[in-house]
Image (cartoon, rainbow, N blue to C red):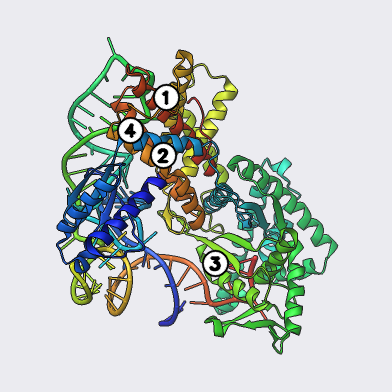
Amino acid sequence: MLLVQNQLIEAIKNGLSSLFEIQANDLVLQETKKEFEGTYTFVVFPYTKQAGLSPAAIAEKLGQFVLENHKGVKKFQVVQGFLNFSFTDEIWVNALLKIIESSQTFTLDNKGEKVLIEYSSPNTNKPLHLGHLRNNFLGYSVAKILEAAGYDVIKTNLVNDRGIHICKSMLAYQLQGQGETPETSGLKGDHLVGKYYVAFDILYKAEIETLVKQGLDPEKAKKEAPILLKAQDMLLAWENGDPEVMKLWETMNAWVFAGFEKSYAQMGVSFDKIYRESNTYLLGKKLVEEGLKEGIFYQKEDQSVWINLEEEGLDEKLVLRKDGTSVYITQDMGTAQLKFEDFGAKKSIYVVGNEQDYHFEVLFNILKKLNKPYSLGNYHLSYGMVDLPTGKMKSREGTVVDADDLMAEMVQTAKERTMELGKTDGFTEDASNELYQQLGMGALKYFLLKVDPKKRMMFNPEESIDFQGNTGPFIQYTHARICSITRKATELGIELIQANTKGFELNTTEIDLIYILGLYKSKIEEAAETFSPSLIAMYTYDLAKQFNKLYNELSILKEEDENKRNIRLTLADLTGKTIQHAFSLLGIVSPNKM
RNA sequence: GGUUGCGUAGCUCAAUUGGAUAGAGCAUCUCACUACGGAUGAGAAGGUUUGGGGUUCGAAUCCCUACGCGAUCACCA
């Protein structure tokens, strides 16, 4: 389609220049609105002054010129200042053949450029929740899209396995754990540890209350609660390598990692390399020391280390505490350095929620000041929070939608829905269970990915995620239906169209479908540039919808005209393959039967 | 309070980056079928794009302003 589009642009340019002596460089064609006839629309309003004619008159003359000078244009229509063009059927069939040829491999040419993407980034003090699901699905999908767009992608995960919050779970476990393990409790490791994170908060709040009752200022009470002080001591002990603390930390972390591994497997996401902050924070400290020598950082009287970013429009920022322990940003500096040493990629994408916009602005500015070779290609893919009707999720207060629970629920819903419809007749038990997985996870992933990543989105746990309309299962269904058609076609010995492009007559439904199919590769490109899986999701929906429309209006295998039958089968086949590929970019499986 | 993002149908989301009568799904109502898979298709209804001003041939989109909702401004991560 691109070729046709460019030819049309050229023809319009020539028309403008020879009719009105207007030299226009960047002409943009728009898609013609559904209610009008045509494929592309050229807006002539901007040229009325230069041409000295009414918009309609310009459009009329220009349309006539293009019709005479461009063989592929079948007709044009003028509506006010909008000039709409339609192409001949032959152009469309040729376009279809080109699309098929280029869809042999859907991926774009290799760009010879490495890109790092970091996503997931869980804390090892609690299980994953709904927000993490959006993060993981997004990160995985963006990685897939970048790969398809021709980049060499390295997926990384930075696990936040150290810090005061980890000590909180540990401390509560020490106090109340009584030797409980995942085995004895029957709880998944991350859930067990999360239980003690909540327990800490309860103890902490109780202590604050007591202190306040004793007449202490609430703000002061928050800082001086004994259990909090103990947690701080524990962090220091950890950084000093205290054997007992280290042992507990290792044990509890191992539980959490085992739990996460299961969750990741269920999500269908993976990583090329997993980093742990416990391994990178020392490197961060080293970078701080270097920067201190070079005068990029400075030390205050209490020994804490800072950077001044006021010139960049930001504040002073702490990079090392007065007791010498590292903070969040110290670790991120170390990780950035380590990632560069490991992979040498100059482009790096961080998939992290928009609550950390400020943090990443600071981090990227620090890296620039340090003049690191990887300091210019950083991008914070800042996605919006998932809101519940009750407001924001808070782990400590238990107002979270747990990731494992939600995924299990989705699979269960898929099962019920499928059994209601009696769709698993002839399936083995294993096959049915696999199908429920694919459908349930497809619904969930599509639900979270179809929305523009930058935007906040709403999730209502009371209303289950749909399986009809603009949903994953709707598109999966379309794919399965197409598979059924192509299976039958093979049995009947019906063939796809070959190179012969003469003598085909097309309906608008077919033309519209060819048009959409032709957009796919440019959608991949666009999604890669904007890091937006939602573009792929919306595209796939449009494609499936257009195919279903055709399916309802026209016969495919029962069509008696051989040319028509074969071209429709070709369209079905290509649609199925495109859906399958597009969904793979979203991390969604397209079953052949459902 | 400073910084920053957002506000579109009852609900959840779109809108080709300034273009035509603002589009989909869900929910509501009507219709199509002995079908190549109905987890479908066609249609109705639903909107002063938060309010008010401005910029121009043309504004959901850009500017100003008021209101509303988030995020952030930690020696938490």
**A339 or A12, which lies in front?**
A12
Which kind of residue does numbered mark 4 sit on? Answer: Glu
Query: If you read the primary sequence from the N terminus, does the residue marked by circle 4 or circle 3 appear first?
Result: 3
Q: Which residue is mark 3?
A: A356
Kindly identify which chain the residue marked by label 1 belongs to. Answer: A
Q: Secondary structure at mark 1?
A: helix
Q: Which residue is mark 2?
A: A517
| Within-10-Å neighbours for mark 3: few <14, some 14–19, many 20+ | few
Q: CA distance from mark 1 to mark 2?
A: 33 Å
> Residue A64: where, in percent of width, then height?
20, 49
Which kind of residue does numbered mark 3 sit on? Answer: Gln
Query: If you read the primary sequence from the N terminus, does the residue marked by circle 1 or circle 4 appear first?
Result: 1
Kindly identify which chain the residue marked by label 2 belongs to. Answer: A
Q: Secondary structure at mark 4?
A: helix
Q: CA distance from mark 4 to mark 3?
A: 47 Å
Work out whether A371 lies above or below A432.
below
Q: Which residue is mark 4?
A: A510
Kindly identify which chain the residue marked by label 4 belongs to. Answer: A
Labelled disc at residue A420: 1
Which kind of residue does numbered mark 2 sit on? Answer: Leu
Q: Are marks 1 and 2 on the same chain?
A: yes
Q: Secondary structure at mark 2?
A: helix
Query: If you read the primary sequence from the N terminus, does the residue marked by circle 3 or circle 1 appear first?
Result: 3
Quarter of the rendering containing residue A241:
bottom right
Dot 1 and dot 2 residues touching (CB under 8 Å) = no
Kindly identify which chain the residue marked by label 3 belongs to. Answer: A
Which kind of residue does numbered mark 1 sit on? Answer: Glu
Q: CA distance from mark 1 to mark 4?
A: 34 Å
User: A242 left or right of A133?
Assistant: right
**A233 or A549, which lies in front?**
A549
Q: Are marks 3 and 1 on the same chain?
A: yes
Task: Give the foreground label among 4 and 3.
Answer: 4
